[in-house]
Amino acid sequence: MKNSKKTVLIIVAVLLLSVLLYFLPINKIIGRLPLINRFYNNTSIEILVKKGKAKVWIDGNDYGETPVSLENLPEGKYLVELEKIADKGTFYKKQSFNVDLVRNTSARIDLEIGPEDILHGIILYYTPISSSSQKGFLAVSSDVEGAKVFVDQEFVKGSPVTNLSLRESQYDIKVVAEGYEDIEVPVLVRNNYVLNLKTYHFPIPVIFDTLDTNNE
């Protein structure tokens, strides 16, 4: 009889544990356990804003002002919000970005925030991918439709580029679009990861020549 009760209790415990593991974000839970977290987490994010500073929130938590560099974060999807700090009377909208953080990788947000939702810079992060070959992959998207993507000065195709297979190495990525400022950034492609690169481009200012209508 006692053995039967023990068996029932074990089955119930296993079922409850299975349900908890299925519905709860186990990666984040493990990553926050004392002692374990320093070994389990090796994930970082760096947030920079050019020509000024911005307030930073991650998943609703205030992280002060840029530059912000965080390490040993649990892996998962994070909501990063930036609001440029400006003089009174100058209005900049709060910008929001979803970034995947994966163990043993680093993510980077490096932007210049302009008025009217105009941005210039990059967001870069890795996502794991199953591959039978020892290769890494590159995915590039731009906020300008039809932007051209170059890898080590060689034209690849128009944006978006999806899962371009590359050997593990460092590459120079350049994204250009007519009428917009170029983006050029060095990146590291890693085996069994997709390097996700999102680019934002300022429009090139149009300068009009003024005509002298004064009679000499």
Image (cartoon, rainbow, N blue to C red):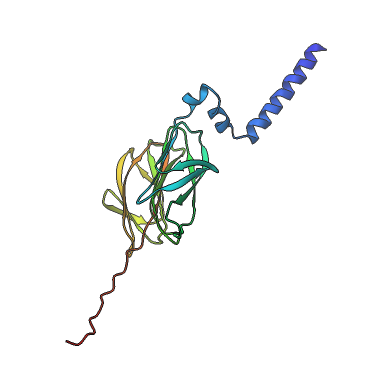
Residue 196 visible here:
no
Residue 113 visible here:
yes
Residue found 44% across the figure and 59% down from its top: 90
**Relative image position of residue 133 (x, y in whole percent):** 39, 37
Given residues 133 and 147, the one toward you in this image is 147
Total label count?
0
Residue found 31% across the figure and 69% down from its top: 206
The quadrant of the picture occupied by the C terminus is: bottom left
Farthest residue toward the left? Answer: 216
Farthest residue toward the right? Answer: 1
Residue found 31% across the figure and 56% down from its top: 182
The quadrant of the picture occupied by the N terminus is: top right
Farthest residue toward the top? Answer: 2
Residue found 34% across the figure and 37% down from its top: 168
Q: Is residue 9 above or below residue 172?
A: above
**Relative image position of residue 163 (x, y in whole percent):** 41, 47
Farthest residue toward the front? Answer: 88
Q: Is residue 91 above or below residue 185?
A: below
**Relative image position of residue 116 (x, y in whole percent):** 45, 62
**Relative image position of residue 100 (x, y in whole percent):** 49, 42
